[in-house]
Amino acid sequence: MMEDLTKYAVEISNYFSYNSVVILSYFFICLIMLILNAISKNKINNFLVIRRGSIFNPMNYVRLVLSGLCHSDWSHFRNNFLTILLIGPMLEEKYGSVHILQMIIMTSIISSLIYLILHNNSGAIGTSDNVFMMIVLCSVVNITSGKIPITLVLIFIFYIADEIIKQISGKKDNVSHDSHIVGAICGFIYGYFIF
C-alpha cells in the first residue's frame, strides 16, 4: 500500500511543480484554516481575530500575524487569493522566498497594529492588506532611473484612491479599507526603498 502511494506521488510530481514555495504554502495554510473554521463553527476566527488586550498576553502578539490566515468565508478567501496566486509567484521569483515571506509577515503586523490604533472594536481578519501590498509592489517593480511608471499611477487611481474614498466616506461595509491602504503603503516602501 505504501509503495503504491509513493509511486503515485512520484508520478504526480512529474507533472506538477511547487513553483512558489511561500505563496503556495500561504494559500494552503489559509485554506486549511478556512476549513477548520467552518468545521469549528467560527471558533478559529473568533480565537485569532485581532483584539485589544493586555500587552502581557502573548496571544495578542501572535494574533497580529495569525489573523491574516483567517477568512470569513469562501468568497473572502477566493477574492484575496485570486490576486495573490496571480502576482505572488512573480514577486517571489523576483525578490526571493525569504524576502516575500518577510514582507507578508511585516505587512500583517503593521496593518494589525494600525487597525488596533484606529479602531476600538475587534474583528479584522484576512489577508487583503497583503493583496494590496503585492499589487503596489508589482507596479513598483518597473521603477527605473528615478522615473515613475504610469502603471503605478494607474494602480494608485484604481485601487488606492478608491480605498481612500471608501475610508473617508465612513460607510460601514465590514471591510477594513485602512488595512488596504496600509498594505499599499507597505508595498510601495518595500519596492521603492528597501528591496
Image (tube, grey):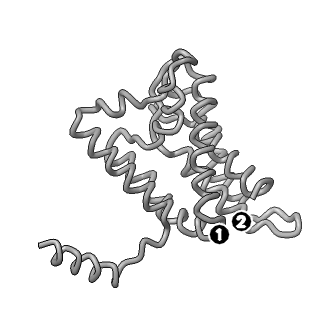
Q: Position of residue 26 (x, y in %)?
A: 45, 54
Label 1 crowd bin: few (<14), some (14–19), many (20+), radius 10 Å: few
Q: Position of residue 125 (x, y in %)?
A: 45, 36
Residue at point 41% right, 76% down?
17
Taking 38 as reference, is 180 left or right? right
Residue at point 77% right, 54% down?
194
**Pointer 1 or 2: first along the chain:** 1
Secondary element at tag 2 = loop
- The quadrant of the image that shows the C terminus is bottom right
Secondary element at tag 1 = helix
Q: Callout 1, which amino acid?
A: Lys
Determine the CA span between mark 1 and mark 2. 9 Å
Q: Which mark is residue 74?
A: none
Label 2 crowd bin: few (<14), some (14–19), many (20+), radius 10 Å: some
Query: Which mark lies nearer to you, 1 or 2?
Result: 1
Q: Callout 2, which amino acid?
A: Val
Q: Position of residue 56 (x, y in %)?
A: 55, 17
Per the image, the residue denoted by label 1 is: 94
- The quadrant of the image that shows the N terminus is bottom left
Q: Is residue 2 above or below residue 27?
A: below
Residue at point 29% right, 30% down?
43
Circles 1 and 2, Cβ within 8 Å, touching? The answer is yes
Residue at point 52% right, 28% down?
171
Which residue lies most toward the right here?
Answer: 145
Per the image, the residue denoted by label 2 is: 141
